[in-house]
Amino acid sequence: MSDRILVDAKNTFCPGPLMELISNMKMAEVGDELELLSTDEGSAADIPEWVNKVGHEIVDSFTEEEVLHIVVKKIK
Amino acid sequence: MHILVVGGGMGGTILANNLARRLSGELEQGSSKITMLSASDKHMYQPGLLYVAVGKMSTSELYRDQKSLLEPSIDFHVDPVEKFDLDNNAVTTKSGKKISYDIICIATGSRGNAAGIPGLAENACQFYTEADALAMYKKLQKFEGGKVVVATGVPHKCPMSPLEITFFLIDYFKKRGIWDKVDLHYTYPIGRVHSLEPVAKWAAPEFDKEGVTYETLFNMKEVVPGKVISEEDSSAEFDLLVTVPPHKGMQVIEDNELGKGGFIPTDKKKLNMEGRDNVFVLGDTTNLPISKAGSTAHFEAEALGENIAALVQQGEPVRDYDGKVFCFIEAGDGKATYAMFDYNNPPNPQAPTSGLHWFKTAYNRMYWASARGII
């Protein structure tokens, strides 16, 4: 597994955190972990919804200084 | 001080002209020089391709001679870069010339990558090159009705284009009198019909009003004749598939290993390549999580022009790029609106009006003045 890939989508509106995560997941290798940073209130719900629907894995999720961190592992 | 601008699209052109004006004294004295290297002697108005695809604009309106858009003091060459030697502040061009610089600005852009999804290029219409936009228009003209699907890949250039092409298709089919024979189905990668929530809240009821069906969380995995299959294990059958394809950065960026997917890691405020103080990146070439749009390149170019001129004249940059983006949204039926936002302020688009459509139509002509840096 390579180093964790940081996807900093704080304070961005378009394409937004989920689209940014999807773009980076496509470029990642199976087994890679991506850490998404988001200040979008909807991310806490819509990121896990997409990750679970596609079949990737949420490794960790926490909020630090009002920034949501979600760590996702690419499964397939 | 030699400033090298790589790429003659919107970002590179506005930046070079901006710098040429700010550094006119230094250029005249010979203490500074601006060189632009581009792959073409023509400059394309890329947003016009959307209009070409539905017969609203001719291809002759898309181009100007690149040199005619540039300040005369800019040393312009059609000789694209093939090798970047950033450690030694030099590039090698296609013709074999080695060019040294003090500051380099990389604005090579992005390109559609339908080939990245199996079956997409073979089975879908798209409009991100002149040839593709013309082919799409020809296919539309022969279409007599059936299931039409709009499917979008990520990342993509022009975040409004999935909505705009959908509204233009409605107009097109209505104008031809076959709208009642068309089932239009819109798909989108995230959980609403557009990445901007206020835009999505406006567009979904518009789709409902027109009878356009839609499916969200739909990311293309594969296309076979008559069917597009998503990563989310859904599918949509079609007689005509229109795609906003996923995009990549340019091959030369990938070949030189400057960034994954051809997108260069870039500081979101200073716009320098991460880890390098004399390498600046703008437009679609950055890996910034903001819209890949002409206006992004435009506002980045203005910030960089001010900063690079200040670097030359004072030794320090003077401002940050604030993430500003301004996008028109063609809403069909002769109306348009816009979305404007930056890193700190979300968009608040208003209801579409015919006045904004005509302003957008006028901007399609005024673009050339914008590229010259006049507006």
Image (cartoon, helix red, strand yellow):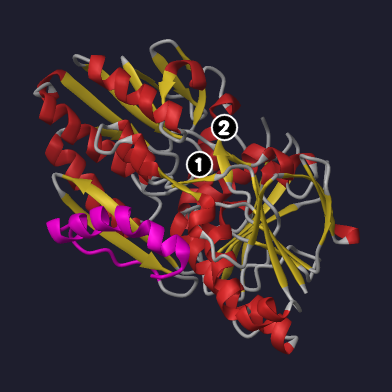
Residue B162 at least partly seen? no
Image coordinates for residue B45, horizontal then vertical, percent: 42, 47
Q: Is the residue marked by circle 1 packed among few (<14), some (14-19), or many (20+) residues within 10 Å?
A: some
From the viewer's perspective, is residue B121 above or below residue B274?
Answer: above
Residue at far bottom of view: B314
Tag in front: 1 or 2: 2
Q: Under tag 1, what secondary structure?
A: helix
Say whether residue B59 is left or right of residue A43. Answer: left
From the viewer's perspective, is residue B18 above or below residue A50?
Answer: below
Q: Please tell me whether the stretch drawn in magenta is mainly helix, strand or loop.
A: helix
Image coordinates for residue B178, horizontal then vertical, percent: 12, 21
Asked whether the residues under marks 1 and 2 belong to the same chain, the reply is: no
Say whether residue B139 is left or right of residue B271. Answer: left
Q: Is the residue marked by circle 2 packed among few (<14), some (14-19), or many (20+) residues within 10 Å?
A: many
Residue denoted by label 2: B113
Say whether residue B168 is left or right of residue B47. Answer: left
Residue A2 at least partly seen? yes
Residue B360 among those drawn in magenta: yes
Residue denoted by label 1: A50
CA–CA distance in space, label 1 to label 2: 23 Å
Q: Chain for mark 2?
A: B
**Count of picture labels:** 2
Q: Which residues are magenta?
A: B346-375
Say whether residue B17 is left or right of residue B91. Answer: left
